[in-house]
Amino acid sequence: MPSDELSEAFKQAAEIAKSVPEHLQETAFNRALDAILGETPGGAKGSSGPPKRNAPKRKGITKQKDAEIEPTVVLLEHMDSTAYPQVHDASKVIDRALLILRAARDDFEIDGLSSPQIAKVLTEKFRHKTSRQAVQMALASAGRMVDRVTPASGTPYFRIMRAGETYLDNPPKESTEREKKKSRRKAATKSASRESTGNQVAERRKATVKRRGPSKKGAYAVVTELLRDGFFKTPRTLNAIIEHAANDLGYHLKTNELPAPLLRYLRDKNLKRAKNNDKQFEYSEA
């Protein structure tokens, strides 16, 4: 091949290589040069005459070569999403992006991906629909966790740094601002609920006290007091007991309240009873 044609082939290959990320430019250059030389008169095949249209690719131009130029081809075809459960568990775009960058570097020897490439892997491989803008914003605010590489020509890409790996291995324990706000709202709601419940209980207690009215002695306590004071040394009828309790003690008893305590003292042999001339029972000390 004449030197001028060879020089032109090198220039064309160099131009093509500029369109890919810097860490892939060498591979892209070699691939492009092979393709140009294979289609050029006097190239590796030793062909002569004018260049043929739709000339078959050289044996060395394989799908793997295409994969080396476009990293997402490798990741989408060979990455097993089930082997990276952390990606599914992560709730933030920055966490998922860093996990993809580390997996690409450690398991596929791809040291760096652009925002569109990361978004494509997350969306198509892991089914986490993510836009390149979201990835770009997350990585732009990642600080020392990533290294942003801007080639002379081509798309900028990101590489994970030690700070990013430390972040993934030891996620911060403190709550995010959203979680803090949610916790404060929950605490405020719980406090308001307790206060409301307390007010309701207090109101119920007031209503109960109001319904009950003033406390009073029961019939048994009144009979006990009368027995202790010697009231039954003289035989007493039910009416006599009720009138004495109301007039002298201020306890207002009903006729149906007295039989039970009087019968109890009768069984205990503290009282006895007998009918008077009016056929009424009279109670006296035993």
Image (cartoon, rainbow, N blue to C red):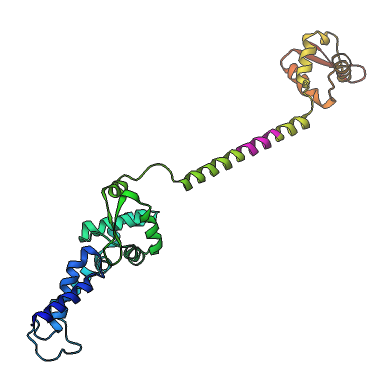
Q: Going by the image, does 183 lie left or right of 90?
A: right
Q: Residue furthest bottom?
A: 49
Residue that appears at 13% across and 84% down: 40
Q: Position of residue 29 (x, y in %)?
A: 18, 71
Mark yes or no: residue 226 visible: yes
Q: Nearer the viewer, residue 56 or 50?
A: 50
Q: Main secondary structure of the magenta part?
A: helix
Residue that appears at 83% across and 8% down: 233
Part of the protein shown in magenta: 194-202
191 versus 263 height, above or below: below
What is the quadrant of residue 17 in the picture? bottom left
What is the quadrant of residue 266 in the picture? top right
Quadrant including the N terminus = bottom left
Residue that appears at 12% across and 80% down: 4
Q: Position of residue 75 (x, y in %)?
A: 26, 65
Q: Going by the image, does 277 lie left or right of 253?
A: right
Q: Nearer the viewer, residue 274 or 110?
A: 110
Q: Position of residue 187 (x, y in %)?
A: 54, 40
Q: Residue furthest front?
A: 4
Q: Going by the image, does 232 lie left or right of 109?
A: right
Q: Is residue 195 magenta?
A: yes
Q: Is residue 251 magenta?
A: no
Q: Nearer the viewer, residue 222 or 119?
A: 119
